[in-house]
Amino acid sequence: MTKLEELTNLLVNEIDDFKKDVEKLEIINNQLKDTKIKVDLTEYKSIIDSHQQQMEVYKRTFKDFENRFNNKINQAKIYPTWAVVVFVVCIVVTVTLVSYIFIK
């Protein structure tokens, strides 16, 4: 009977310890539920703001470059208009003269 009593006593002790541990866990769980975690984002916010300002400057710079480039392309002409007209007139006159000479 002593062995049975020892085992029973041991089981009761283990159950009591388990119950105490469960109560401790419940207390910790309740504390965790009530705990509010605050994240300090001020440093990241300032970094993001400065990055956003840099990106705005880059966008403006690129837009200015694009406008200047488009203006240069629109103003640039490979040949002046008067030169093209003179060239076409010369070709037409030459063809006309050559055909006139061969027809006679």
Image (cartoon, rainbow, N blue to C red):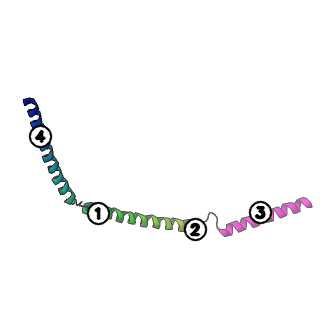
Image vertical order of residue 83 relative to residue 29, above or below:
below
Between label 1 and label 4, give the one nearer the viewer.
Answer: 4
Secondary structure of the magenta portion, mostly? helix
- Separation (CA) of disc 2 from disc 4: 95 Å
Name the one closer to the observer, 62 or 20.
20
Between label 1 and label 2, give the one nearer the viewer.
Answer: 1
The spot of residue 63 in percent (x, y) is 46, 66
Q: Are marks 1 and 3 in contact (CB under 8 Å)?
A: no
* In-image side of 24 versus 61 (left or right): left
Lower sequence index among marks 1 and 4: 4
Q: Which mark is residue 45?
A: 1
Amino acid type, callout 3: Ile
Q: Are marks 2 and 4 in contact (CB under 8 Å)?
A: no
Lower sequence index among marks 1 and 3: 1
Q: Which mark is residue 74?
A: 2
Secondary structure of residue under mark 2: helix
